[in-house]
Image (cartoon, helix red, strand yellow):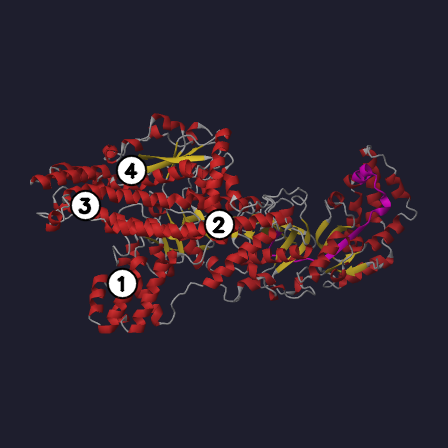
């Protein structure tokens, strides 16, 4: 590959005009270093599709601490250390740190074998314990108190001789929130990397035995049916049915606002009370589902913003009234999964191969529930609670005039918030106003402006010299970065959006670009959804659309799995479909090849 | 061997009598795959005709005595014998049997294909003999007789004779059957492999096709459209539509094949619909399952409004036994073209498929398969193996 065909070097990336001061948002240890020009980096558009606000860097800083610790030091994966990340112009680039020395690999393998073996062997019971610990962490983050900093301490602080004033807890509890978030991530990776390991070996086996098998077909053999991510949508359907059964369905009309519907239900006597009781039950935990995938503070849960569930409810209510509630064809899906697995198994040429196939597929199905469901506990439930807790600290800072409004807190790095809270703690103690009110607002204003400017920057998909071989199975599995993908990045097609072929079939139709799930009210029956990423909270959308296209995601992503269940074509992980396609465009989605073409 | 001079395709089964091609067509007909109706001029008819041309076997003994290295002498001797084979009158019984068989295919001016069907097991020999041995659009009884003799003569191609001499094969064991089949007038035709010719993947069917007769593709006159479809999921995973500049079709009211420019609106249009691709793959899989090995198949697909007659065979309707494995997911196919005449395009496609030939795939079959993986004491050991190696 010649020089000019490659990707730019990190050192060649120019500042975006109008956002030259972007470095002020990010820590020194996230900057590209001169030596980084020697290495291949790719833009982690899957997790960070937009510029990262200063606080949200916590979603790279902490996960990469946890992932690296897990692979490099906890399980001691023989061939891989951790993942390094850098931020430039607001975008997160990553590279994997491989172990190449065979002697070192051998030394690590001796430690890795028994450790990983222990987890696989006890997978189910370990997962049960994991869920308990995760629920514990969620309870803890919800219980973290943001001190009210009332005028005087309550009597009990004195009469129970506690002696420690509220301002102490301001900083302690903020840091406790961060510590809990960090623990959550350590648990997140605790079983996940091994889970992906099981996927990777099975994918490799399948592509060797059947060189033309698609990732989505392998995924279909693995996919579990009874996974948590369908629960939020199932709960909505149940609530819709209940509204009809109780005779309060007239309240669920398209365009109605959640608060008004809830208020109206209060006036509907026993029926209304019954529905509200069921609603409250469903909300905890199932409405803790995030509208995104938990890497930005603005990925809110249904509980944080009831718009999504209440936009979906009228459609489901209409279906329930007509007696046509869509039901997941679970048995059919299980039969289909078995038919595909048996079909490939039968094509293998020896009993040995079939036995190995059974072992690997069995291992995948063992780890699948964790791999799928951990997202609900971690990225959805815990993370949406965590961001709301940080917002509470933001509300306190706003109350003391350090920032203009609670959400501004997300434009400060956590070390800056720590400083601002110290400022407030001092001021409250001294009886004077904090000094941050003169310090932070202009900084925040500049950062908000820069984030907007950076949004339009077309981040190169990769930086640095193209590696001769990119065989890292984890990178392929997690990010879909393959040699072919790199080729496609280097030779972008003018009129075709290329992504991962996630669900088969070809359809043409009108595009509806939704940046946020809250906009689902705009969606018309039979349109093709084009969105940044989908998460379980998007599930109601799939009942209406005939194909799905996303910027982010791989063959095991939410959009991919749901689209396959609905039997509709899907192309995911396109990187920039939401930028290149506009609402109203007539497009052709080819879920077999992973391409989207704008026709008119 | 029964000693028949001619057998109908439906009865063709012994390769020694009807050749490999004849036997495989007979097989196809018997498992319910539609093949164009036809008959086989047997190895017995060949032997009888040879007896008339070379009664004492003198010529063939001379051929057998040729030194393997003297290609010039082989060339002269073989050419001389070929001219005898194509010009000598046929024994009356052989000619009568062929004429009677031809008459049953649709009257005195029916278009037929005349194809050699080698009786030898050796595939290399078969492919030499088969180099120029398919004649399309043959019309009229006397022309059929001529082309049968040309097929026989192809056994004495220079390359064929030289090959037999190199291997020291006896000339007395050499025989050739000839298949005579009613021509189809396909909308599209081509080849398919029930395993990927590129990667050897056994889970896919690879299809190549072009508009009109498949000769355009076989002769290399066009770059065909190519499609890959999964046997397991029915998904079309590969789709490359090529500009198909030339079109082969039967010469109207006359013998032979006419080559024209493809009409502009068809050139860059795919020659198969998704339903047709699936129906073809389905037919291919049935043959593969019956033969117990991946197949290399020549196919044709008839016009939507074609009467079933041109390709009628005694076979049951293939669409009557749909394979659930290949049944297409309705949501996975593109917006169906408006065709009110055919309420079920998938069934219609299945009915219009005709197979012209099927033989075992040889390239990948000849390669030693290395097992991808073997079982290990614990399932987790597979993961340890993966991460224990340098990436």
Q: Are marks 4 and 1 in contact (CB under 8 Å)?
A: no
Q: Residue furthest left?
A: A431
Residue A452, position as x, y percentages in the image: 24, 41
Mark 1 and mark 2, same subunit? yes
> Which region of the structure is painted magenta?
B161-190
Residue A221 part of the magenta-drawn span:
no
Identify residue for label 2.
Answer: A364
Q: Going 41% across and 36% down the picture, which residue do you hit?
A: A72
What's the distance in space between the residues labelled 3 and 4, CA to CA?
22 Å
Query: Horizontally, is A291 left or right of A75 in the view?
Result: left
Mark 4 and mark 1, same subunit? yes
Q: On the image, which quarter does residue A418 sit in?
A: top left
Structural crowding at the residue carrying mark 1, measured as other residues with C-alpha within 10 Å and reported as few (<14), some (14–19) or many (≥20): few
Query: Which numbered disc covers residue A90?
Result: 4
Mark 4 or 1: in front is 1
What's the distance in space between the residues labelled 1 and 3, CA to CA?
27 Å
Which is nearer the eye, A271 or A66? A66
Query: Horizontally, is B277 left or right of A77 in the view?
Result: right
Residue B136, position as x, y percentages in the image: 69, 52
Q: Earlier in the sequence, mark 3 or mark 2?
A: 2
């Amino acid at each position: 590959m010649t020089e000019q065909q490659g990707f730019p070097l990190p050192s060649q990336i120019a500042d975006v005009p109008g956002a030259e001061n972007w470095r002020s948002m990010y820590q020194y240890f996230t900057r590209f270093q001169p030596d980084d020009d020697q290495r291949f980096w790719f833009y982690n558009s899957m997790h960070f599709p937009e510029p990262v606000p200063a606080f949200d860097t916590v979603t790279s800083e902490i996960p990469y601490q946890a992932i690296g610790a897990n692979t490099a030091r906890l399980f001691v994966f023989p061939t891989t250390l951790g993942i390094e990340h850098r931020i430039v112009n607001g975008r997160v680039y990553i590279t994997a740190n491989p172990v190449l020395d065979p002697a070192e690999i051998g030394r690590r393998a001796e430690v890795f074998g028994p450790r990983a073996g222990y987890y696989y062997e006890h997978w189910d019971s370990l997962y049960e314990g994991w869920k308990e610990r995760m629920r514990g962490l969620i309870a803890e983050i919800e219980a973290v108190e943001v001190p009210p900093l009332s005028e005087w301490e309550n009597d009990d602080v004195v009469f129970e001789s506690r002696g420690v004033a509220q301002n102490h807890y301001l900083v302690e509890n903020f840091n406790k929130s961060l510590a809990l978030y960090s623990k959550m991530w350590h648990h997140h990776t605790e079983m996940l990397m091994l889970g992906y390991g099981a996927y990777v070996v099975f994918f490799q086996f399948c592509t060797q035995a059947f060189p033309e098998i698609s990732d989505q077909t392998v995924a279909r053999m693995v996919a579990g049916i009874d996974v948590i991510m369908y629960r939020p949508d199932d709960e909505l359907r149940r609530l819709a049915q209940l509204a009809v059964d109780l005779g309060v369905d007239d309240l669920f009309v398209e365009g109605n606002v959640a608060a008004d519907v809830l208020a109206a239900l209060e006036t509907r006597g026993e029926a209304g009370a019954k529905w509200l009781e069921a609603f409250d039950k469903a909300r905890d935990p199932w409405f803790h589902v995030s509208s995104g995938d938990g890497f930005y503070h603005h990925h809110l849960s249904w509980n944080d913003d009831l718009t999504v569930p209440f936009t979906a409810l009228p459609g489901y209510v209409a279906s329930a009234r007509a007696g046509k509630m869509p039901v997941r064809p679970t048995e059919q899906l299980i039969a289909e999964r078995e038919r595909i697995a048996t079909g490939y198994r039968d094509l293998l040429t020896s009993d040995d191969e079939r036995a190995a196939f059974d072992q690997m597929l069995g291992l995948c199905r063992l780890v699948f529930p964790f791999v799928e469901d951990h997202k609900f506990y971690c990225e959805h439930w815990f993370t949406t609670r965590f961001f709301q807790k940080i917002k509470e600290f933001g509300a306190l800072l706003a109350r003391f005039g350090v920032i203009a409004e609670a959400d501004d807190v997300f434009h400060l790095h956590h070390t800056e918030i720590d400083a601002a809270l110290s400022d407030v703690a001092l001021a409250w103690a001294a009886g004077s106003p904090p000094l941050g009110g003169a310090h932070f607002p202009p900084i925040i204003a500049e950062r908000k402006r820069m984030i907007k400017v950076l949004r339009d920057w077309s981040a190169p998909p990769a930086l640095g010299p193209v590696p001769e071989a990119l065989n890292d199975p984890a990178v392929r599995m997690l990010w879909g970065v393959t040699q072919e993908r790199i080729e496609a990045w280097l030779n972008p097609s003018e009129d075709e959006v290329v992504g991962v072929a996630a669900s088969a079939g070809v359809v043409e139709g009108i595009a509806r670009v939704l940046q946020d799930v809250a906009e689902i009210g705009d969606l018309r029956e039979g349109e093709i959804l084009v969105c940044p990423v989908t998460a379980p909270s998007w599930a109601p959308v799939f009942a209406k659309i005939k194909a799905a296209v996303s910027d982010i995601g791989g063959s095991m992503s939410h959009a991919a799995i749901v689209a396959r269940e609905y039997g509709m074509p899907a192309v995911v992980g396109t990187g920039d479909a939401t930028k290149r396609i506009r609402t109203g465009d007539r497009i052709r989605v080819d879920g077999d090849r992973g391409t989207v073409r704008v026709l008119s | 061997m029964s000693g028949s001079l001619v057998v109908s395709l439906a009865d063709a089964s012994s390769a020694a009598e009807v050749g490999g091609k004849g036997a495989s067509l007979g097989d196809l007909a018997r498992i319910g795959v539609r093949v164009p109706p036809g008959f086989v001029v047997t190895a017995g008819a060949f032997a009888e005709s040879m007896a008339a041309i070379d009664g004492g076997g003198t010529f063939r003994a001379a051929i057998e005595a040729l030194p393997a290295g003297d290609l010039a002498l082989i060339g002269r001797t073989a050419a001389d014998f070929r001219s005898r084979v194509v010009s000598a009158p046929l024994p009356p019984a052989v000619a009568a049997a062929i004429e009677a068989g031809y008459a049953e295919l649709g009257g005195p001016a029916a278009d037929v294909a005349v194809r050699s069907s080698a009786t030898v097991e050796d595939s290399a020999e078969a492919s030499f003999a088969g180099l120029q041995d398919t004649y399309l659009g043959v019309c009229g009884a006397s022309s059929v007789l001529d082309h049968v003799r040309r097929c026989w003569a192809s056994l004495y191609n220079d390359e064929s004779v030289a090959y037999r001499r190199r291997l020291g094969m006896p000339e007395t064991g050499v025989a050739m059957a000839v298949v005579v089949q009613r021509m189809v007038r396909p909308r599209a035709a081509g080849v398919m492999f029930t395993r990927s010719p590129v990667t050897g993947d056994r889970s896919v069917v690879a299809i190549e096709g072009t508009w009109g007769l498949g000769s355009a593709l076989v002769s290399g006159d066009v770059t065909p459209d190519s499609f890959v479809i999964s046997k397991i999921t029915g998904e079309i995973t590969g789709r490359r539509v090529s500009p198909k500049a030339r079109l082969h079709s039967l010469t109207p009211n006359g013998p032979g094949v006419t080559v024209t420019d493809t009409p502009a609106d068809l050139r860059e249009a795919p020659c198969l619909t998704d339903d047709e691709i699936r129906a073809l793959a389905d037919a291919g899989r049935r043959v593969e399952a019956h033969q117990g090995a991946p197949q290399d198949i020549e196919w044709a697909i008839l016009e939507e409004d074609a009467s079933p007659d041109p390709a009628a065979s005694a076979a049951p309707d293939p669409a009557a036994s749909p394979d659930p494995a290949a049944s297409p997911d309705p949501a996975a196919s593109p917006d169906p073209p408006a065709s009110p005449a055919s309420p079920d395009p998938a069934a219609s496609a299945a009915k219009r498929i005709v197979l012209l030939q099927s033989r075992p795939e040889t390239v990948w079959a000849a390669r030693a398969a290395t097992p991808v993986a073997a079982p290990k004491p614990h399932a987790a050991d597979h993961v340890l193996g993966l991460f224990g190696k340098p990436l």
